[in-house]
């Protein structure tokens, strides 16, 4: 097979492409300074991943495209406030996730869900704990957690992302994800006991 370029030219082109392909930190600084080409590069680098992330959260293809594009638009509009010491990629995914939670069609799935009253539901261990109801209540509890903690818990526990997949999406270490999950489980158990009572919750866990 005859190469169209000499090995020297191929190596030169590879080196040139690396030089022109800024890392995310450099992109953050350039975008903050209003560099449209840097923003375009950031868009091309992360759009597909963000789009697939939205689709994995049961968004339609049209919704996923719209949410992803709006997240990028917000990055550009708020570029003056970019914190160069933090991951712009993580900020992008957090914006998209927050917009998704506020999305009318997404929220409509849970808009009729109300946490059971502590007095009537939490202390009556004769009541059965329906699994579908529990899932809805968990979604409600997640929405009340600190934003990043709730996002991590939703991805790892509800969507069954691995810690590494979640860490990659948010551009943090798996250890950070592990810490978020520990706090989220603590929050979840505390709220479920408050709502249903410890006896009922334990009886559900044994029969699950």
Image (cartoon, helix red, strand yellow):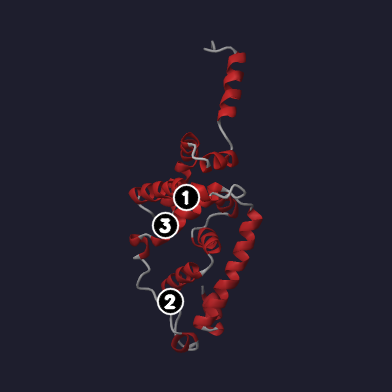
- The residue under the point 60% across, 19% down is 12
Q: Secondary structure at mark 1?
A: loop
Comparing 32 with 88, the one in front is 32
Residue 63 placement (x, y as % from top left): 35, 51
Residue 185 placement (x, y as % from top left): 58, 69
Are the two marked residues, 1 and 3, in contact with CB atoms closer than 8 angstroms? Answer: no
Identify whether 18 is placed above or below 97.
above
Q: Quadrant of the N terminus?
A: top right
Rendered image quadrant of residue 9: top right
Numbered circles on residues, count: 3
Considering only order in the chain, which callout, 3 or 1, is on the residue closer to the N terminus? Answer: 1
State the residue position of label 3.
99
Comparing 168 with 196, the one in front is 168
Are the two marked residues, 1 and 2, in contact with CB atoms closer than 8 angstroms? Answer: no
Q: Is residue 18 left or right of residue 70?
A: right
Comparing 29 with 127, the one in front is 29
Rendered image quadrant of residue 3: top right
Q: Is residue 199 left or right of residue 55?
A: right
Mark pair 3, 2: CA separation: 30 Å
- The residue under the point 53% across, 47% down is 89
> Is the residue marked by circle 1 packed among few (<14), some (14-19), or many (20+) residues within 10 Å?
few
State the residue position of label 2.
130
Point out the frontmost of discs 3 and 2. Answer: 3
- The residue under the point 47% across, 89% down is 119
Identify whether 205 is placed above or below 22.
below
- The residue under the point 49% across, 51% down is 93
Identify whether 91 is placed above or below 138.
above
Q: What label does residue 78 carry, if any?
A: 1
Q: Secondary structure at mark 2?
A: loop
> Is the residue marked by circle 2 packed among few (<14), some (14-19), or many (20+) residues within 10 Å?
few
């Amino acid at each position: 097979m005859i190469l169209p370029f000499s090995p020297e030219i191929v190596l030169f082109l590879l080196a040139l492409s690396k030089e022109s392909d800024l890392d995310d930190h450099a992109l953050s600084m350039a975008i903050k300074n209003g560099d449209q080409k840097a923003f375009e590069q950031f868009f091309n680098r992360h759009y597909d991943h963000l789009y697939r992330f939205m689709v994995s959260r049961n968004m339609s293809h049209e919704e996923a495209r719209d949410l992803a594009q709006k997240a990028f638009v917000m990055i550009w509009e708020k570029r003056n406030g970019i914190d160069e010491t933090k991951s712009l990629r993580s900020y992008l995914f957090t914006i998209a996730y927050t917009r998704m939670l506020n999305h009318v069609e997404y929220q409509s799935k849970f808009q009729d869900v109300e946490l059971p009253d502590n007095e009537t539901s939490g202390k009556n261990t004769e009541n059965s704990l329906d699994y579908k109801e529990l899932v809805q209540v968990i979604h409600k509890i997640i929405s009340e957690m600190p934003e990043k903690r709730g996002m991590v818990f939703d991805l790892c526990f509800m969507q069954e992302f691995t810690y590494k997949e979640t860490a990659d999406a948010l551009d943090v270490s798996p250890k950070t994800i592990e810490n978020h999950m520990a706090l989220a489980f603590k929050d979840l158990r505390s709220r479920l006991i408050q709502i249903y009572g410890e006896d009922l919750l334990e009886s559900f866990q044994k029969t699950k």
